[in-house]
Amino acid sequence: AQKVTQAQTEISVVEKEDVTLDCVYETRDTTYYLFWYKQPPSGELVFLIRRNSFDEQNEISGRYSWNFQKSTSSFNFTITASQVVDSAVYFCALRGSGNTPLVFGKGTRLSVIA
Amino acid sequence: GAVVSQHPSRVICKSGTSVKIECRSLDFQATTMFWYRQFPKQSLMLMATSNEGSKATYEQGVEKDKFLINHASLTLSTLTVTSAHPEDSSFYICSAREATSYNEQFFGPGTRLTVL
């Protein structure tokens, strides 16, 4: 079974601070995919990144960066120089091999205060 | 990227009535569709998986007679909440995947159901 743990329920930071959202996953599949989504107050999920299990390269996209470490089964997400518009709920998700659904973590609610 | 639409975006109904939510893949053929439910301040919980032309597979604890899912075409899936009650009030999100790429799962904007 797939499982995703986001231990941080809520985080509050002041604008321009860096913040890291943690994600730990469990799977028995050797091939799997990890995702991060942003859910603003409107509710619509915004896709941020997908990583497959064979690609441990860290990725940077603007102020966003992701650190994938198979050794610790973690896929952490860092926002650099946070902005008020980053305030949202962030979900980490996992999908195993084959035509299986995404399994979501409980989400981390990020509040960036001006 | 591919687009998934949902209709309606919001619906308010009286207790005991049935509500149908449509999910459409606009520019691709969705061989598999997933329905999720999200209660306030909680995560997305998978309700069911449906493959076009087949009966939906429901997750444990989800009543198949209450949440009727029909995936009759490659671009349309419907979720009908039958005899809705206030505890069914939630945010329902559909997601679609095409056969050529299991990597991609596209999400609709969600439907907020309020049962009075």
Image (spheres, coloured by chain):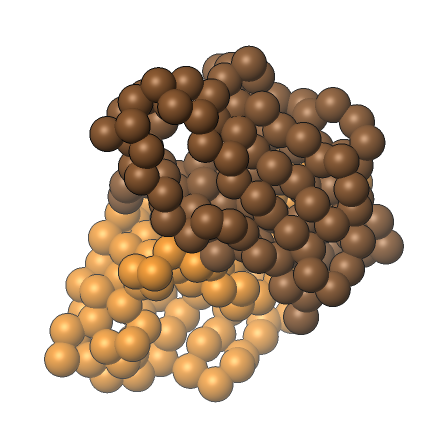
Residue A66 or residue A114, whichever sits in front: A114
Residue at 62%, 29% in the rendered image: B69
Residue A13 percent location from the top left of the image: 19, 69
A48 sits to left or right of B41: right
Relative height, residue B54 to residue A59 (above, below): above
* Residue A53 in view, yes or no: no
Task: Quarter of the image for the C terminus of chain A: give it.
Answer: bottom left
Residue B83 percent location from the top left of the image: 41, 18
Residue at 48%, 64% in the rendered image: A46
Residue B1 or residue B74, whichever sits in front: B74
Residue at 61%, 57% in the rendered image: B4
Residue A43 percent location from the top left of the image: 38, 56
Residue A50 percent location from the top left of the image: 62, 62
Relative height, residue B16 to residue A92 (above, below): above
Residue B89 quadrant:
top left
Residue B23 or residue A89, whichever sits in front: B23
A76 sits to left or right of B84: right
* Residue B19 in view, yes or no: yes
Q: Tag count in the figure?
A: 0
Residue at 78%, 42% in the rendered image: B73
Rendered orange, the chain in question is A
Residue found at the far right of this picture:
B100
Task: Quarter of the image for the N terminus of chain A: give it.
Answer: top right
Relative height, residue B35 to residue A65 (above, below): above
Identify the hue of chain B.
brown
